[in-house]
Amino acid sequence: MSEYSVEKTKKYTLKLRELIKVLPPCCADFFRGIELTTGIMTRYGYAVDLKTFFTYLLDTDICKGADSMRDIDYSVLEKVDSVLIECYLEYVSLYQPDEDSDMKINGERAKARKLSAIRALFKYLYKKERIKNNAPALVDTPKLHEKPIIRLEPDEMDRLLSTVASGSGLTKKQKEFHQQNAVRDTAIITLFLGTGMRISELVGIDVDDLNFMSNEVRVTRKGGNEEQLVFGSDVRKALLEYMVYRESVVPAEGHEKALFLSMQKKRMTVRSVELLVKKYAQIAAPLKKISPHKLRSTYGTMLYRETGDIYLVADVLGHKDVNTTRKHYAAMSEDRRRFAAEVIKLHPSEDNAEPVSPAVSDKNKDKTE
């Protein structure tokens, strides 16, 4: 496991433990029970969503007499029914967590995630025979509408890379730092477009993860699995140019292994890379909201267009379910639909028939009559 992954695991394990201290006692058993089958980010996400659910539950009639979430026991959970959970999902559509917070909006995907956390808890407790009622299993998952897939076209990719290299279009203030960061930023954008890796994978790369002998980079996938991604000549060139600069930099203490460093000589964060991509993409493709994930989608589409092999695309992108991969070649499907619209001829004989002049047509008509 990379240094970044280790530090990330430590950070969120401590945050999870703090949340468990305020959640109902049954949650401690739940998180301990799913530790071997889930990643730390999944468990932490469950804890955040469960805290929202139990905060709502405290204001309902079934929690009368309870002063805090710690007072919620199995007898209370037995009273939870499907209608109450549906009311909760309606509540989180628009709610205020506390008096000092702004109103929060949750769409269908956020609601589905919150329902998933409740289902996981009740399923575990039901399986362990701590409760006899599994109400969340009776609640339908919110319908998820597919979002349009935004990606770059070849000319936009070329324009993006040119913008990163030249700094053309940047503000005066942005240009002050561009020359120092151009090689690093080019390597980052090229890695996204040339491998389709996730942003979490990119920021977690250590210098030792690069192997220029085999043109491979080791990344930590979702779930903590390590994989070797093979990169091409364009990525190799960009990385080698960056390494010349990287070797001259003295990293901040604790960030010696990090590949990509910020201006403060620390490992770049997910947020800083998101802002970096946005800065250049607004110039190269102003009509599209391009993020690191959109660059990943761009890679997926290009790979499918070139190979036609969806299973290869799924493997390279690290998708466990090939259906997830289908989103990355939506543009290709559109191309095929346009082809389908023209391939069927309703009057096939007309393609080879000679054009008939109006005069001849009228003459034939007279003979017929």
Image (cartoon, rainbow, N blue to C red):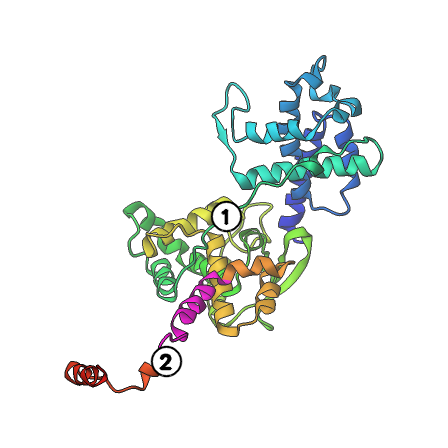
* Residue 245 is at least partly visible in this image: no
As measured in the structure, the alpha-carbon distance from the residue carrying label 1 to the one carrying label 2 is: 68 Å
Vertically, is 309 above or below 293? below
Residue on which disc 1 sits: 265
Residue on which disc 2 sits: 348
Magenta-colored stretch includes residue 136: no
Magenta-colored stretch includes residue 335: yes
Mark 1 crowd level (few <14, some 14–19, many ≥20, 10 Å Cα): some
Three-letter code for the amino acid on which mark 2 is drawn? Pro
Q: Residue furthest right?
A: 129
For marks 1 and 2 on the same chain, the one whose residue lies earlier in the sequence: 1
Which mark is drawn over residue 189? none
Residue beneath the point at 80% across and 35% down = 126
Vertically, is 78 above or below 4? above
Cβ–Cβ under 8 Å for marks 1 and 2: no
Secondary structure found at label 1 = loop
Residue beneath the point at 51% across and 63% down = 300
Near-viewer residue (57 or 240):
57
Vertically, is 219 above or below 19? below
Residue beneath the point at 57% across and 66% down = 313
- The quadrant in which residue 369 appears is bottom left
Near-viewer residue (305 or 334):
334
Look at the image and give the residue range highlighted in magenta: 329-347
Q: Residue furthest top?
A: 65
